[in-house]
Amino acid sequence: MYINGEFRDTPTGKTIEVTNPATGEVIKEIAAGGREETLEAVKAAKDAFAEWKWKTGRERGQYLDAVAHKLRQNRALLAETITKEMGKPLPDAQREVDVATDYVEWYAEEAKRVYGETIPASQQQKHLMVIHEPVGVTAAITPWNFPVSMITRKIAPAIAAGCTVVLKPAPSTPLSAIEVFRCFHEAKLPKGVANLVIGPAEEIGATLTQSPDVRKLTFTGSTEVGKKLIRDSADSVKKISMELGGHAPFIVFEDADLDAAVTGALLTKFKNAGQTCISTNRIYVSHLVAEEFGRKLAERASQLKIGNGMHEGVEIGPLINENAMKKVQSHVEDAVRQNGKVLCGGKPFVTEEKNGYFYEPTVIIHAHEQMRIAKEETFGPVVPVFTFQDQEEVIQRANHERYGLAAYCYTGNLQRAFHMMKALDYGIVGINDPSPVAAQAPFGGFKESGIGREGGRSGIQEFLEEKFVSINTS
Ligand code: ADP
């Protein structure tokens, strides 16, 4: 843990075991905290806020620049830590650190650009303006699938805005969080501005939501936990930002560049072994090209190299744990029971190290809406392929009743591209683009996929309050 500018290794009696999902080995056992440490962290953040909020944007930006510098210096260590505790291939982990650094750099700049507004008054002697002030102490709860970039994507805009933070990372990936905080420490971020509490989710979560001193909660994780946190935040009417689950459709029209679409589908489905909230969950292909597309996709998916992310050339790492394996297996079994045909994969993969949670990249054709996989988030390397006849039909089927995070569409027709952009009920739309994410762009979902945005100009607004000031000079 890291509270009020100090690392705490002192055992509290409670510990967390960190496991490498590629080997099943326990990498480390670390001291965990609970309610008491969380309250201390909130107090440290509250005390620090009293000074931090008065710093100029330029000063806060300079601290963030120093953090970005430390992240860059520690890129190799951070990437290795990510791979060892959550499994993604090392080059992907390196890219994650780069993305995490991008967010810090972007908000180092944005800290200087928190503009207010003047409003023309209706009386001569009145002067109306809007200024922006930091919300206050912020609780941040992050997941394991991007254990470094999810942290900086929350903390960088929060501290750029003038807030102070208490972070609770996912229990499976605390080591990445510790390394990020080492960068904060080495960048000499003033004590109490960013605090880290590691321990049981429910206890820490409840302490944070119940605290009236915590004015903002920012969360990335499952829709189910997000809903609970929204409910728990109601009593003290906290501001909230929620990045929740998704069920991304990937639409391929007959006028698309089919090879580009296959490459896009591979990236959006199998990166991170399908464990991202914007992973493709359903592929819809025009009936005119469905057979060819399915064949090409299965061919390339079956060539992806599975294994320990530390090994050279590996493209797909393990799933995070046994529960993730069970969910993936149950989705495949259900699809097969309902006449889905497995074109490639369809079973666990056993490596030399034996104990990892590996699953083969799997493509299932003859998919239909009654399958569980058509509605529930799989969070694994399995994709069903549906066919469609026309544009209006696929729009209707692609728009999900509950989720609205990301959608992808491949077409060579400009008119159609613009129509799809508007017709898809999703917060993020990638047209002929498998990675519609950038530090300078808003990321977030419609419907039950979330509230608020991270990244871009909107990302910092989430941590600001508007204050209207009326000055009467009569
Ligand atoms: P996932 O299925 O991706 O692990 P979760 O929503 O379970 O998603 O976890 C995301 C984050 O939320 C993790 O840091 C986890 O520890 C935390 N979390 C889970 N349950 C709670 C809870 N009741 N209160 C606060 N945080 C929680």
Image (spheres, rainbow, N blue to C red):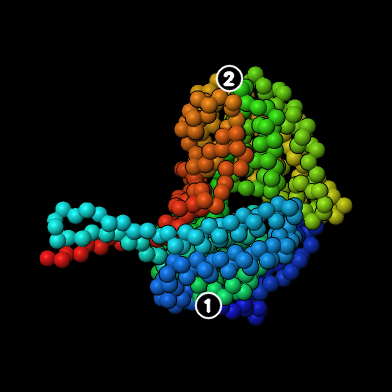
Q: In which quadrant is the N terminus drawn? A: bottom right
The residue singled out by tag 1 in the image is 191
Q: In this view, does 454 lie above or below 346?
A: below
Q: What element carries label 2?
A: loop
Q: What element carries label 1?
A: loop
Amino acid type at mark 1: Lys
Q: How crowded is mark 2: few (under 14 residues within 10 Å), some or many (20 or more)?
A: few
**Where does the image place residue 239, in percent across and percent down from the top left?**
41, 59
The residue positioned 51% from the left and 62% from the top of the image is 108
Q: In this view, does 213 lie to the left or right of 267?
A: left
Asked if residue 200 can be seen in this view, the reply is no
Residue 373 falls in image quadrant: top right
Q: Residue at x 64, y 56 (%)?
A: 98
| Residue 90 located left or right of residue 374 | right
Asked which quadrant contains residue 288, the reply is top right
Q: Which amino acid does label 2 sit on?
A: Gln
**Location of residue 418 in the rendering, given as x and y in whole percent from the top left corner:** 49, 30
